[in-house]
């Protein structure tokens, strides 16, 4: 028996492939979190007298070993098992027998998947925020090294006013730090313990100690009421993808600037050979593909957010298998933002800024607004009059 609900009736292969789909492979990244949530659940069953101390001890040891073996790559969730929850219970029961068969008391895969997802999401958001901080730190290092370099500030891609390299790096560093704060704040919706809601309506007969699993798993609170839990699936995920999309946009705009700055026409930056790619036909070319792809991938988190929202929109309340389809865009969108952030944190320290080219671009016309402001302050002219005079000089 592979699936928890099997009744020895053969399952149509095409149906299995369609329903388990890629889910079993996606679930590999939830295994460690399902292990943690299962350990907390078993401890709660022990405290309530549904597992003996010895049974709980065996379950805890087996869960740790199964989790460690998975981390070492010794097993993967198989298609036949549908998901990580089934894979874990199968292995637990194989390892400890009856105690493993007792563990599903008081839970359902519906609350199990949310517990694992939320624990994963809280870690992932903190990690992505850290990667965003890494980009901001790399920008700060450029400012510390060469921040005083003069360069034009652009509006409409036309030279507008003088600014400095620190003005440019500082803008992106500040916004990317704000994105990191947004990612951390997006943990709020993931910080509620779904365990105890079971299939979505709690459990009969038993009284589950939700405070115990809430504490053990580090959730801020139990998710109440239990009937709200399945209604919330996808919302923490959407919040995370929204914040990731904002980060991806800032990374993409930074990359877009660098692509421009690396043109012969601008010549503000030089990319070392290791960062550039060549052309199959044009021997002289060194292309900034890495920045183009960061820019090009800006849409991935946004597309993932829309895909996810389209799954949950208009679903009736309660659990539906549709909800499984929220995992793929969640992982894809966050992975994409993470890849962009890691690439930029790696590449930025290697970008060289050309002081002479940057200064040469700050032509005297860029001081027109400054001249007008001086006339206002020094001669007491109305701004519009000073503006006209500045334009003519
Ligand atoms: N893979 C499923 C999901 O992500 C796990 C929950 C399955 N529950 C069920 N009743 N079939 O939604």
Image (cartoon, rainbow, N blue to C red):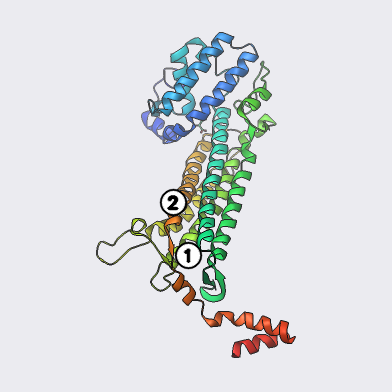
User: Looking at the picture, how far across and down is residue 65, in whole percent?
Assistant: 45, 20
User: Looking at the picture, how far across and down is residue 222, in whole percent?
Assistant: 67, 30
Please say if 99 is above or below 119. above
> Left or right of 214: which side holds 120?
left
Q: Quadrant of the N terminus?
A: top left
Mark in front: 1 vs 2: 2
Which residue is under mark 1? 257
**Local crowd at mark 1 within 10 Å, few (<14), some, or many (≥20)?**
few
- Mark 1 or mark 2: name the one nearer the start of the chain: 1
The residue that appears at 61% across and 12% down in the rendered structure is 50
Seen from the viewer's position, the closer of residues 58 and 388 is 388
Which residue is under mark 2? 346
Q: Quadrant of residue 292?
A: bottom left
Q: Is residue 159 visible?
A: yes
Residue situated furthest right in the rendering: 380
Under circle 1, the secondary element is: helix
User: Looking at the picture, how far across and down is residue 14, in whole percent?
Assistant: 37, 32
- The residues tagged by marks 1 and 2 sit, at their Cα atoms, a distance apart of 17 Å
Q: Is residue 6 visible?
A: no
The residue that appears at 43% across and 32% down in the rendered structure is 24
Residue 278 image label:
none
Seen from the viewer's position, the closer of residues 212 and 26 is 212
The residue that appears at 45% across and 55% down in the rendered structure is 349
How many labels sit on residues? Answer: 2
**Local crowd at mark 2 within 10 Å, few (<14), some, or many (≥20)?**
some
């Amino acid at each position: 028996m592979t699936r928890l609900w099997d009744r020895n009736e053969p399952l149509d292969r095409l149906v299995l492939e369609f329903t388990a789909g890629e889910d079993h492979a996606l679930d590999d990244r939830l295994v460690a979190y399902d292990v943690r949530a299962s350990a907390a659940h078993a401890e709660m069953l022990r405290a309530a007298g549904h597992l003996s101390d010895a049974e709980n001890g065996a379950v805890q040891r087996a869960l740790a070993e199964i989790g460690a073996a998975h981390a070492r790559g010794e097993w993967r969730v198989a298609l036949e098992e549908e998901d990580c929850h089934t894979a874990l219970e199968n292995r637990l029961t194989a390892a400890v027998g009856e105690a493993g068969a007792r563990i599903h008391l008081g839970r359902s895969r519906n609350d199990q998947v949310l517990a694992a997802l939320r624990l994963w999401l809280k870690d992932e958001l903190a990690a992505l925020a850290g990667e965003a901080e890494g980009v901001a730190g790399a920008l700060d290092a450029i400012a510390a090294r060469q921040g005083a370099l003069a360069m034009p500030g652009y509006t409409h891609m036309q030279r507008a006013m003088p600014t400095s390299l620190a003005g440019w790096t500082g803008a992106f560093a500040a916004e990317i730090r704000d994105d990191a704060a947004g990612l951390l704040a997006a943990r709020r919706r993931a910080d509620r313990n779904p365990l105890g809601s079971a299939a979505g309506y709690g459990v009969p007969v038993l009284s589950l100690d939700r405070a115990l699993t809430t504490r053990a798993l580090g959730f801020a609170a139990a998710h109440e009421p239990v009937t709200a839990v399945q209604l919330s699936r996808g919302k923490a995920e959407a919040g995370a993808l929204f914040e990731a999309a904002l980060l991806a946009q800032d990374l993409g705009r930074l990359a877009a600037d660098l692509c421009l700055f690396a043109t012969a026409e601008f010549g503000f930056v030089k990319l070392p050979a290791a960062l550039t790619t060549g052309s199959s036909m044009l021997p002289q070319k060194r292309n900034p593909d890495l920045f183009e792809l960061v820019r090009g991938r800006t849409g991935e988190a946004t597309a993932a957010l829309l895909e996810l929202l389209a799954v949950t929109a208009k679903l009736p309340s309660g659990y539906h298998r549709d909800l499984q389809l929220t995992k793929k865009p969640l992982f894809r969108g966050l992975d994409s933002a993470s890849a962009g952030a890691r690439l930029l944190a790696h590449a930025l320290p290697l970008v060289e800024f050309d002081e002479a080219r940057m200064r040469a671009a700050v032509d005297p016309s860029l001081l027109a607004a400054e001249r007008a402001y001086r006339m206002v302050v020094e001669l007491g002219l109305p701004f519009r009059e000073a503006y006209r005079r500045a334009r003519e000089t």
